Amino acid sequence: MADTETLALALAETLGDQQHQAAYIFDPAAEAPVSDRPAKRRRIPKKHAAQPEKPKEKHARHFQPLLNGLESRGASRNKPVHSGGGHWIYQRMHRPKDRFPHPFCPHHHRSQHGLAELAFDQLSDSLETRAGAKVVLLRSGDASNLKAALRKIILEVVANPSGAGEEQDLSLDNDGKRYLNYDLEALRSHLAHHPSPHVIVAFQDSEAFETGLLTDLILLFSSWLDRIPFKLLFGVATSVELFQARLLKSTCQLLYGRQFDVEQADTIVEKIFKTAVAHVDAPLRIGPVSLQMVLGRQRDQAAGVPIFVSSLKYAYMCHFYTNPLSILLAENAPQVALRAEHLEVVRSLSSFRSHVEASLRDKAVSHVQSLLDDDDYLNRQVQEQLESSRSWARRSLRTLQLLMCRPGQASTFTQLYVDLLTHGVDGLDQLSDLVSSMRRMDPAEMISLLNQIVAIIKDDDGSMGLEGCEGESVPSVALLSGIVTEIQTLCREAEKAGRTLRSEYSGQNKIMRTTVIAQKVQLSHDAATLTPQDKSYTRLVDTIIEHMEALLKCERAEDIWLHEAWLYDFKTPYREVFMPRPRSVVQRALLRPHDYLACSCCNSSKDQIMPTLPATAILYHLYLETGSLINVADLWTAFFGIVSEDEADGLDERTALVMFYRAMSEMRALGFVKPSRKKVDHIAKLAWL
Amino acid sequence: MAPRRKADAPEPPKAAPVRQSTRKRATTKAEEPTNEAADEDKAAHPSPAKRPRGRPTAASKLQNGASQKKFIYDVPSDDDAVGGEGGSNKDKDQAEKAHVGDEEEEAEEVATTPKRKVKTTTSPVKASGTKNIITPSRATRFTGGETPQWRRNDRSARKKSARALIERVVAGDASDEDEQEELAQEIYDSSQDEDEEEEELGEGPEGRAREIDESEAAAASPSKKPRGRQKKETALKQKGRARKKSPTPPRDLPPYELYFAQNRPGAAKTSSNTLASLELLTHEEYFSILHQHKEHHAGDIEYLQSWHTESFPQWSFELSEGFSICLYGYGSKRPLLHKFAKFLYDETPDHQTSKIVIINGYVRSTSIREMLGTIASAVDPSHRLPAGNPSVMLDSLKALLSSHDIDITVIINSVDAVPLRRAGTQTILAQLASHPQIQLICSADTPDFSLLWDSGVRSAFNFVFHDCTTFAPFTVEIDVVDDVHELLGRKARRVGGKEGVTYVLRSLPENAKNLFRLLVTEVLMAIDDEGVSGGENPGVEYRILYNKAVEEFICSSEMAFRTLLKEFHDHQMITSRKDVLGTELLSLPFRREELEAILEDLMA
């Protein structure tokens, strides 16, 4: 199709013509609607057919802030990672420039593509805003040779983000001189009119650049350095040594650089996790099943950070799109008067049901009565419950932090979080581990651990929005700090007596390794020789553990009533939407068309090819029985045998042939068969599904 | 150990045999005591013949008069005490093996699932046997030295399989190579069968015996090779092939197994039927029949489509949140996407600031430049993108977008179609999709489309996927008749049609035109005489045509004649084939009506 047609495409009105056009503008009205209405952008289309009880305006208003909050928090977390590099460049600019300042940005080779891109994008943003620099991102794909690279650099620098008629500047100087589009002189004259302190050229994947090209570029830049303030930035996936080894020594000497590390994807994911998932103020809790899927995908598919973010976003979207109760999570929820429909929904929740049952067991009949009958009461209860869910979140995070401070803690924060949500604290191995390890600690370890715990309880954790020293935990802080001082005095006393302080349990560590009989002896021996200090230390340890067990209390999210409103824990849309299995979908469609068509004719329980199946499905069934080389004549005979089988409405030969043709061409389009030259009228099998 | 055994030795070995036999009975419950006794007698039978070779031990002498049964089981303890006698050692081995073989025979006759059980019973015996094989001495019945070659081969195969079984038992891994083990067991059993042929006189199931013979022969033939393992493998292969003879392969093989099973050299055996007798479809016939044909699933397909239509609001929500959408599944999704475009169009209040561009990937001439150009013209109809490198075009398109307040929804039909499959194109599309003002929704038809994108491209696309199986026919996407003919290697059938021929002839000299006219006339006459058979026109003999051409002063030499023909052949305007006698026949790959039209053109 000729290019000239492209412009005429919009004019083509009949669908028949459009089918065969490569590209066209869709405009069913076909008349050009000329209206001078002010341009108004609607990024949020209306789409609430599915939820009639939710007013459109309200939804649009609520949804956006929630997501925006999440996004900005996630993004801002990343920034500090690279600001070091930017800052350094910023400082360098005032130095005499005999050599290039060029920070290396080595990112470990395991870090994903997306991460590197993210790092560079953020870096260029911050550099442009903070230092007023012009940043050119070069990828190896963009710059195959010197000319292309230079052209790209000049284009990027000259292209003004404000977009005000910059086209002329490119090739035409004010003096009327013309420059070739890869001539750096053009850049110089541009900079003379639009001065900029830096021109930063960032090589994203420096390994992929040809060595010669890199060398040429560096030489060229250094010779222009007195006129154009070039700075270079290299992304190095391997190591700086290897990078230097690739360049000539003379070239290396032109460079003057420093190395900055980009953070690992795991760390970033954990940071995002803390701010967006585990954060106290996160409106939506993402449940363990969903989290497990997201994290699993992160691990298995080596998906980048952006994918993690978009997974979270999608979970939010699903929740707010499908769950009518999500309205409770809106920022100004207290003011939102719930409608009767919403209360109906609340009453039909399964968690509501179990809550009612539990209340009845506790003989709180009037409470239940009001819940069921009194809308206002229910409304109040719902608000209270939401409040208590927030305190649950705080509690669970606190628990998590305490568990994390166990010495020798192996699992990551994210993993522990998922475990905690799944099992509640009682089902965790970590709890018993913590208790037993505390029991066996010697005083010094115990003191440091207690100090750590006190610090955790007292201090804020900004990353998760936890505020320190809440009302309920004040007594425990006092208690624990009291114990610390007591242990210290005991220690001193023991030292004076020339002994080491230990508890009843502390000996066990060593004895465990001997035989069982010996252990018994040793134990009784131990108990016998405990000093009074030791005994009081043992008592202290017992108190601590008792207290810790009381402190570490956190039920499963699913045991809380009304969790449906703030907990999103589904597997289904996520897996289908992000990890599709197209092969099995196509296979299923062809093997069992009934699953999709739900027709009355094709449903056979037996493993039998029904003549009413779509032609391609019949052919696919036959295809499964063939070898790697298929005789089309035989295939046709078999096909015709099947479709003409039915006496009443079996197909005649030519119609069957038409169906056969269509099926064959579809098989080919699906990539199942290809022509074969081995024999006449044979085709080759391509897919073994 | 030894002293205690020795002390036991005099008051003989009842304990051992009894324990063993009870254990056996416990495991193979089908066995009857009488049978067992008979077996053991049978098994014991050969031993006297061999005994002379080994030095008779004290124990054996002692037992000689006693029951045979006792003797057999006595041997091991005796051996241990004495220190390993070759002969008796072997005897014991042999006897036990014989016993085992018999047992299996029994089991197969009586029990339900013999193999497994037998294996479990044999294993302890075998295990004890391993430590006894210290001095491998030849102790066969054919001691005369003139053992026939095949017998010896069988023996060695059998011995090796026995060793394999023993090794496996000792190693203790059961599940891993079940098939091999089974094979070894089979070889082993079969030789056992043979040994007892005299007694049984072909009682065993014949089919099985034959199969085993085959595998045995295979195992035995490369006896010069040093190691037994290879032999077993060849045997395995041989057997596999023997079993493959059934027309339908086993259905429950996993795909990769199926691949290897079907791609073995020589595996493809297809009949030599051809489609010669079938008159292939022409475009006209195809469409006229298709037009009349009523798809009986039409209603269901319609319903399926309407079901997908329900999720239009969801899709547009996802698009608005910055995701791209990819629809996959069997069936054409073009009508669905068209509906979606309509839906979006009706949704948007202002058609100046949000436009929809549809790209048909399946159109063969689709190029990335054209796509970008169309999008640019959607942004600003008066703007023309500077032609050049697609990535440069993309950059200027992005610049254009950012200077306009406009949202573009790009709908791509068949993003995995051939014209768009190049990696460069997909990268450009991904970059396009990641632009905040561009929303992209596409459909993918093949099951393997996700291979198009590496992780970088995919994350730039930011896809969500939806299963949109529609079962709708690919009416526009596929050129059915041409595709099928290409698949069958009948490409030459329709070269440009009448217009193509006229076009070619216009640029050829007068002689060529005359020759072609001659050929057309001849072929038409031949069609009148003989009719069309098998979808191909009847041919004209090369010689006859040449003579006629000379007569009409079209050419003067065969050389010139050939040159003219070659020109036609290059443009695939003629076909040539040889008949049974080897005479070359020339013909034309056009239908009669087309030929007549061409002739008319040429005469005019």
Image (tube, helix red, strand yellow):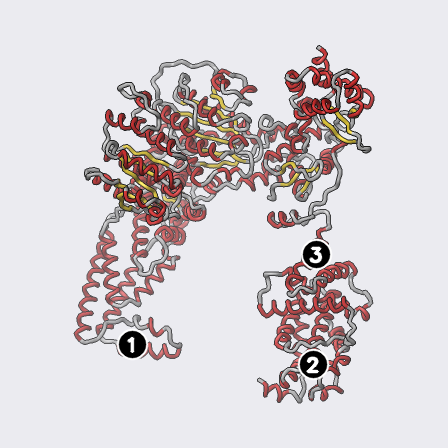
Instruction: Please indicate whether residue A158 sits to the left or right of residue A325 in the image.
Output: left
Instruction: Please indicate whether residue A308 sits to the left or right of residue B420 in the image.
Output: left
Give the label, 2 or 1, closer to the camera. 2
Query: How far is mark 1 from mark 3, CA to CA?
Result: 75 Å
Residue at numbered disc 2: B88
Query: How far is mark 2 from mark 3, CA to CA?
Result: 37 Å
Question: Regarding mark 3 in the picture, which secondary structure is present there?
Answer: helix
Protein chain holding label 1: A
Amino acid type of the residue that numbered disc 3 sits on in the rendered structure: Gln
Quadrant in which the N terminus of chain A appears = top right
Amino acid type of the residue that numbered disc 1 sits on in the rendered structure: Ala
Residue A160: percent from the left, percent from the top?
A: 30, 26
Residue B448: percent from the left, percent from the top?
A: 54, 39
Quadrant in which the C terminus of chain A appears = top right
Q: Is residue A204 above or below residue B138?
A: above
Residue B479: percent from the left, percent from the top?
A: 62, 27
Residue B75: percent from the left, percent from the top?
A: 68, 82
Give the label, 1 or 3, closer to the camera. 3
Answer few, some or many: residues within 10 Å of disc 3's Cα (few below 14, many 20 plus, some between 14 and 19): some
